[in-house]
Amino acid sequence: MNSVTPELSAPEVRTLAERVFNQLQSAIVRGELAPGSKITEPGLSKAYGISRGPLREAMRRLEAHRLIERVPHVGARVVKLSMKELLELFDVREALESMAARLAAEHMSAEEIVGLREVLAIHERQADLKRGEAYYQREGDLDFHFRIVQGSHNRMLMTILCDDLYYLVRLYRTQFSASGTRPQRAFVEHHRIVDAIEAGDAELAELLMRRHVSASRANVADRYAAVLKQEAEQEASPSPAE
Amino acid sequence: MNSVTPELSAPEVRTLAERVFNQLQSAIVRGELAPGSKITEPGLSKAYGISRGPLREAMRRLEAHRLIERVPHVGARVVKLSMKELLELFDVREALESMAARLAAEHMSAEEIVGLREVLAIHERQADLKRGEAYYQREGDLDFHFRIVQGSHNRMLMTILCDDLYYLVRLYRTQFSASGTRPQRAFVEHHRIVDAIEAGDAELAELLMRRHVSASRANVADRYAAVLKQEAEQEASPSPAE
DNA sequence: TAATTTCAAATTGTCGACAATGACCATGAA
DNA sequence: TTCATGGTCATTGTCGACAATTTGAAATTA
């Protein structure tokens, strides 16, 4: 399964630090390194068979991508997203992705739009086949957003969203074991967004994307509230002490 | 040794790498390190009197903040903003700062709003005194935006805007020697934004901030077009060779 | 028993040296 | 003259060792 376009997925791994950075990034996003767990330089150094020099460089890059948090003279631990931070992330995505949709409607080429429609078709096909399996669905969802951001032709936007925030989105999905709910509605919204982009209607594309991300956020917030309520009820009956 | 308010100007400089990072960041933003110039590890290592270890860490952080650009096995050079990238930066700011204004209208405390008004008052006073000197004015402008972002109470937004993008904004001002034009209009816009925030009108605050940043962008784009036209005319008549 | 202090272990920060890669220049041939 | 080719040099990548700091627990005392 890891034969997926090696020259594309790994554009430049000319240095040890870069390779270890990719490995660590994958391990964190996949949940193999537990969120909140402390990671130590000698430990990882031995585990990956490299010296502490390149490892420190890889860790510094992980910190820049907000996948780990470091404290001077103390150490580093894998980031543990709180629900508050997750909702913050949605606010940022709403602002940036709506802008991306607007720019995509203005700048996207015909070929790029064709590719976008293909992603949508694959997305739909998978939803037909594995109705329950939401995991691949969500990966397809990220592909969709990815393409639109690239269609904005704004390099700075692409860097912030694709290189930084989307890894956090993936991380959240593993940490909260988020099964993608509200699938049909998301389908419809995706199609409407592409329609607006194809029509060159920048304002509409922006508005629809803003609503789309906002609806995702509301969905997550609702489920979070439900979980909180459930926990409160469970704590209410058995144990009087805090 | 260095008696320049060590505990105030340096909140946490517990490590050499951090100190050098701050020094280099300041040097780049101030233009002391020429944009596009190549910086070498042994060179800086000697210049700052530290070994290459911490220096590499500082450089890695500079790269994460997009102040330098590194190529493996080749080297690093100070980032040189093109006008295209500057306009991209404005698009990102428009998206993020309008969101920040919206959140600020919802979450800002009374004390924070008082502080914001104070910044505005100082800003205005300076504009009265030094009518021509646009430099301080622009620093005040950045303070204004800074406070609103902090008022959003969204940590992720604060990190992206204040820790990353605002250094690029400062860098642009030195690279393009941008004298702040359209001063009075910006004043009025700032006041209107604060009014909306104080009234708790999130939608209006968002709209006004979006227009404010967009107007700045248009202003820069216009001046850029004028410069291009002027250069084209100069190249047409007098000197065939460069 | 609880609080404080001291000490020791581990971890991070820093350094200098060696290996590997890319850039530059000189030399030669077409 | 221009282009190719080879070598030398500087710079970056990597490594192991030493110093500084923090943490945790053990030991002592009130």
Image (tube, coloured by chain):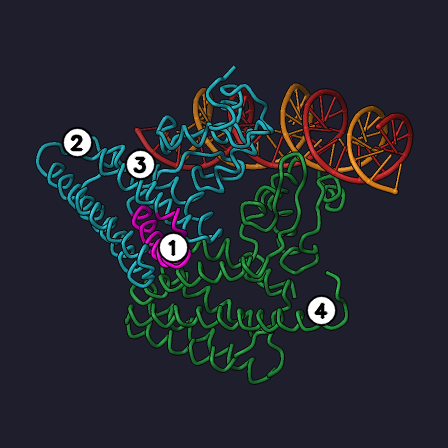
Chain colours: A green, B cyan, C orange, D red
Residue on which disc 3 sits:
B139
**Circle 4 residues within 10 Å: few <14, some 14–19, many ≥20:** few
Of A16 and B66, nearer the camera is B66
**Circle 2 residues within 10 Å: few <14, some 14–19, many ≥20:** few
Q: Amino acid at mark 1?
A: Ala
- Up the image or down, A173 lies above or below A187; here it is above
- Up the image or down, B114 lies above or below A147; here it is above
Name the magenta segment's main secondary structure. Answer: helix
Q: Which image quarter holds the C terminus of chain B?
A: top left
Residue on which disc 4 sits:
A235
Q: Residue furthest top?
A: B1
- Left or right: residue A154 versus residue B126 is right
Look at discs 1 and 2 and give the one toward the viewer.
1
Which chain hosts label 3? Answer: B
- Left or right: residue A107 versus residue B23 is left
Image spot of residue C4 (x, y percent): 78, 30
Of B61 and A140, nearer the camera is B61
Look at discs 1 and 3 and give the one toward the viewer.
1
Location of residue A190 (image quadrant):
bottom left
Residue on which disc 2 sits:
B132
Image spot of residue B157 (x, y percent): 44, 52
Q: Amino acid at mark 3?
A: Glu
Which chain hosts label 1? Answer: B
**Circle 3 residues within 10 Å: few <14, some 14–19, many ≥20:** few
Which chain hosts label 4? Answer: A
Look at discs 1 and 4 and give the one toward the viewer.
4
Q: Magenta stretch?
A: B84-113
Residue at figure coordinates x 34%, y 65% from the top left: A104
**SS state under label 2:** loop
- Left or right: residue C26 versus residue A68 is left
Which label is found at residue B104? 1
Q: Mark 2 and mark 3 in contact (Cβ < 8 Å)? A: no
